[in-house]
Amino acid sequence: MAIFRYENRFSAPSREQRERYMRGEHEELSFSDGQVLLIAYDEAVYLKDDINDVRVLFTGVRDKQEAYEEVRRIIGPGGQEDKDGTMDG
């Protein structure tokens, strides 16, 4: 559907976007000692990247897959989940 990119750590999805995409049950995955956080909802994935100070909201099935590819680009090929169920780069 769409990818919404916020170019600084203080920007965030609008109230309308949060109500539409970021609701219900979700799964959180953390990478690189918590510097990268991926929050997966039914209809969207929200990526908080504190390494590059970027936030991205991926919506739709195809775009949700891009979120996981983006994490791989950020943390590099050797990145793994943090020990507490999250991923470390």
Image (cartoon, helix red, strand yellow):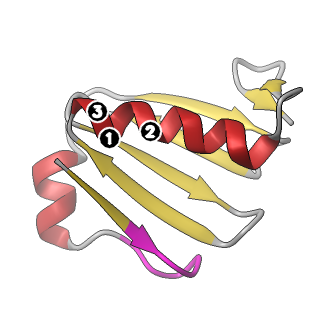
Q: Which residue is pictured at 10% across the width and 52% down the height?
A: 20
Mark 3: which secondary structure? helix
Report the magenta residues as a range: 5-12
Bin the neighbour count of mark 1 within 10 Å (Cα to Cα): few under 14, some 14-19, many 20 and up: some
Main secondary structure along the magenta-highlighted residues: loop
- Residue at image mark 3: 62
- Disc 2 residue type? Glu
Helix, strand or loop at disc 2?
A: helix
Are the residues at dot 1 and dot 3 in contact (C-beta closer than 8 Å)? yes
The foreground one among 6 and 13 is: 6
Look at the image and tell me whether residue 34 can be seen.
no
In the image, what residue type sits under mark 3?
Arg
Amino acid type assigned to the residue bearing label 1 in the image: Asp
Q: Left or right: 39 with respect to 87? A: left
Q: Is residue 41 above or below residue 81?
A: below
- Residue assigned mark 1: 63
Q: Is residue 68 left or right of residue 62?
A: right
Marks 2 and 3 close (CB-CB < 8 Å): yes
Please tell me in which quadrant of the rendered image residue 41 appears.
top left
Whether the magenta-drawn stretch holds residue 39 is answered as no
Secondary structure, mark 1, is: helix
Name the residue carrying label 2. 66
Q: Whole-percent x and y of residue 12?
A: 39, 73
- Distance of label 2 from label 3 (alpha carbons): 7 Å
Q: Are marks 2 and 1 in contact (CB under 8 Å)?
A: yes
Q: Is residue 61 left or right of residue 46?
A: left
In space, the residues marked 2 and 1 are separated at their CA atoms by: 5 Å
The one of 33 and 54 positioned closer to us in this rendering:
54
Question: Which quadrant of the view contains residue 9?
Answer: bottom right
Residue 33 image point, x, y percent: 85, 41
